[in-house]
Image (cartoon, rainbow, N blue to C red):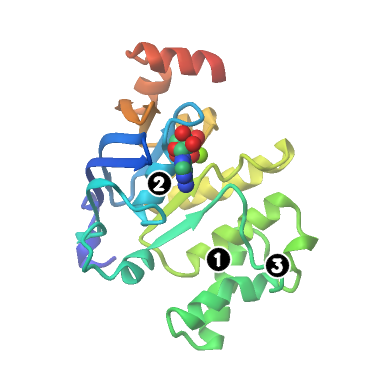
Amino acid sequence: MAASTTAGSTVVEVVDLHKSFGSNHVLQGLNATIRQGEVVCVIGPSGSGKSTFLRCINLLEEPTSGSIKVGGDEVTDPDCDIDAIRRNMGMVFQQFNLFPHLSVLDNCTIAQTTVLGRSKDEAQAKARENLEKVGISEKESAFPAQLSGGQQQRVAIARALSMDPKLMLFDEPTSALDPELVGDVLSVMRRLASEGMTMFVVTHEMAFAREVADRVIFMDGGNIVEEGSPEQVIGTPTEERTKVFLQRVL
Ligand code: ADP
Ligand code: MG
């Protein structure tokens, strides 16, 4: 474990984050901290700004104002080395975004060799280790189109892990999957969490959030309305908007 990420240290710190698209004020002053080894789940209705929040953390969206620090580096500082900061973050999307023309193994090695400068052998060893971890080793020569959605998503997770991220960001990783494929992906995420990976997960899977999250953030209308332990936020919410949302999804 690196000295800068000892247990409990702050991995992400968000202060007064605002984001507007034109006149649409999508994030209205968010404050959040993610600590080393924590699993933080973000829940909330469609359009509440969950994806925008996640995308601001690795600067896929540029914040309108506020500050975001990742591992102590200010992402929002125009002079920061965003590529270096991004290298510490793995991102898994609803759509798996694998390279269609590359095999599973090559999907998991390409960024290792081109971005991290690893040798092909080193990259393949790392990729195989992670394909094994997500339970898909036997598919290393297959192409994405030959895999089910659940398998593709597990490859996407293995690809992200192969960059040795300090933080994994997940944006509704199971929402595009057929119901019978959701469980395998959640199992992989559960395993990552138990191994101590720091995870920030936008999800509609309330059972997963309840079981795996250390902390749940409920967002509505671009604000964090309620935050706390899963038992608190999902089990005994205090805010009316949280109660209404949970009544609809549970
Ligand atoms: P959620 O993930 O909670 O469903 P989003 O963060 O995707 O919410 O969207 C929040 C709001 O921001 C919505 O009103 C959406 O239309 C708007 N929005 C998101 N991305 C963009 C974009 N790239 N350009 C313009 N508006 C956007
Ligand atoms: Mg979204």
As drawn, the label of residue 21 is none
Which image quadrant for residue 165? bottom left
Kind of residue sitting beneath label 1: Arg
- Of mark 1 and mark 3, the one earlier in the sequence is 3
Q: Is mark 2 within 8 Å of ligand 1?
A: yes
Q: Is residue 63 left or right of residue 195?
A: left
Residue 26 higher or lower than 133, as above or below: above
**Residue at x 49%, y 82% (from the top left corner):** 114
**Residue at x 65%, y 59% (from the top left corner):** 135
> Which one is nearer the viewer's eye here, 202 or 182?
202
Label 2 secondary element: helix
Label 3 neighbourhood size at 10 Å, few (<14), some (14-19), many (20+)?
Answer: few
As drawn, the label of residue 54 is 2
Q: Which residue is mark 1?
A: 159
Label 1 secondary element: helix
Which image quadrant for residue 212? top left
How far is the residue under mark 3 from the one under mark 2?
25 Å
Kind of residue sitting beneath label 3: Pro
Residue 17 higher or lower than 158, as above or below: above
Residue 249, x across and y down, in percent: 55, 20
- Of mark 3 and mark 2, the one earlier in the sequence is 2
Residue 100, x across and y down, in percent: 70, 67
> Which one is nearer the viewer's eye here, 91 or 205?
91
Q: Which residue is mark 3?
A: 100
Kind of residue sitting beneath label 2: Leu
Label 3 secondary element: loop
> Which one is nearer the viewer's eye here, 170 or 54?
54
* Callouts 3 and 2 close, C-beta under 8 Å: no
Residue farthest front in this picture: 23
